[in-house]
Image (spheres, helix red, strand yellow):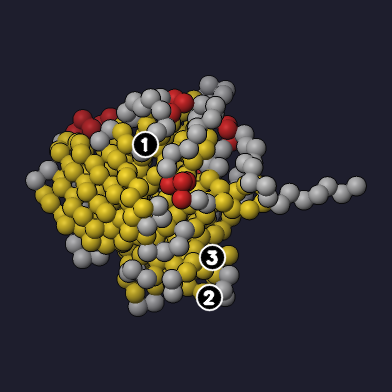
Amino acid sequence: MAKTPVVLKTRLEPQDEFPHDPGDAKNYNESMYFNVFDPGSKAAGWFRIGNRPNEQYAEISVCIYLPDGRIAFAFARPPIAANTEMAAGGLRVDVLEPFKRLKVTYSGKVLLLERPFEMADPKAAYRNNPSVPCTVELDYEGVSPMYGGETVKADGSSLEIDPEKSFAKAHYEQHCAAKGVITVGNERFDVSGFGLRDKSWGPRHWQAIDWYRWCPMNFGRDFGLMLSVIGDGKGGARQGGMVFRDGIYDLIEECVIDSDWDEHDYQTALRATVKTEAGKAYEITGRVLSLIPLRNRRAARDGQEVQTRITEGLTEYRCGDLVGYGLSEYLDQIVDGAPSGRKAGY
């Protein structure tokens, strides 16, 4: 007798903007992420807080791209006692109105890097560059619908997942407008621009994905894209994302990204061909303006160290006659000294 197929659906509710019950998985992670790009001043940044309550710490990242190419960066693992708020280490996210208005603030130190590539060796970077005070106050406004949520069974029950192989059990994104002030040392940047935010929750190991290319971008308040290509670990890739235009999301069904590289295997430029469910096609080029290499390391079950590299490139995008800004975020497992995605042809 043939098995009855499992019917799945995507669930997203206003309360998902707030912390969830972490359950028992040791590597449970609840993460909120925001970026912003000011097309006038050319100041940009991204901010992430990831609660790991069952490990009793949070991960916080603050990355600010200054107009002259310098990058101000902070990373910390401050202690937390529970998964009750998205606030740790001076970084805070407040949900003022679910899916519509949120606020991101930070007060603390950042490492000011004149040569951001030095972050490939964090100990040397912190030893050779100054730390300066930094504040962030940004008000985010959702300008698009929500994209994503939690995949659940038809009756609303959660899917069974293996925590050791999980990157997230739920994920959503939204294009935004953002306005506020960022200070780095004695420099002040009045920010008025656009970006994208996301949230995910569930067990996470950064090594659960072979590689991905994630390219969020905005060409103004009413037009933006998110390109996603994810290695499946078998030599192939899942292509997806969405185009925000005319007030709706048009989902991407085909996305091919071709990248240029420098001597460090960091991306310097890209070309993307996109086709959507609505039958529209887009040709996009990107030029990396400034890039910081980051990494995550942990011991695998066999005791060997595994290393994930994430290169975060502030990128100028062009689509037809339009010029926009965003990120090219490339995640790769480093295998025999080389990034796995480039070896796969991406």
Disc on the earlier residue, 3 or 2: 3
Q: CA distance from mark 3 to mark 2?
A: 10 Å
User: Which residue does the numbered mark 3 point to in the structure image?
Assistant: 251
Contact flag, marks 1 and 3 (Cβ < 8 Å): no
Res. 346 visible in picture: no
Contact flag, marks 3 and 2 (Cβ < 8 Å): no
Badge 3 element: strand
Q: CA distance from mark 1 to mark 2?
A: 41 Å
Check the image and report above or below for 131 versus 179.
Answer: above
Coordinates of residue 42 in the picture (x, y in percent): 22, 60
Check the image and report above or below for 240 versus 207.
Answer: below
Coordinates of residue 105 in the picture (x, y in percent): 25, 44
As drawn, the label of residue 305 is none
Q: Of discs 3 and 2, which sits in the foreground? A: 3
Badge 2 element: loop
Q: Residue furthest left?
A: 186
Q: Residue furthest right?
A: 1
Q: CA distance from mark 1 to mark 3?
A: 32 Å
What residue is drawn where x is 49% and y is 41%? 201
Check the image and report above or below for 308 versus 139.
Answer: above
Q: Amino acid at mark 2?
A: Lys
User: Which residue does the numbered mark 2 point to in the structure image?
Assistant: 280
What residue is drawn where x is 51% and y is 74%? 281
Q: Residue furthest top?
A: 303
Badge 1 element: loop
Disc on the earlier residue, 1 or 2: 1
Q: Is residue 90 left or right of residue 249?
A: left
As drawn, the label of residue 85 is 1
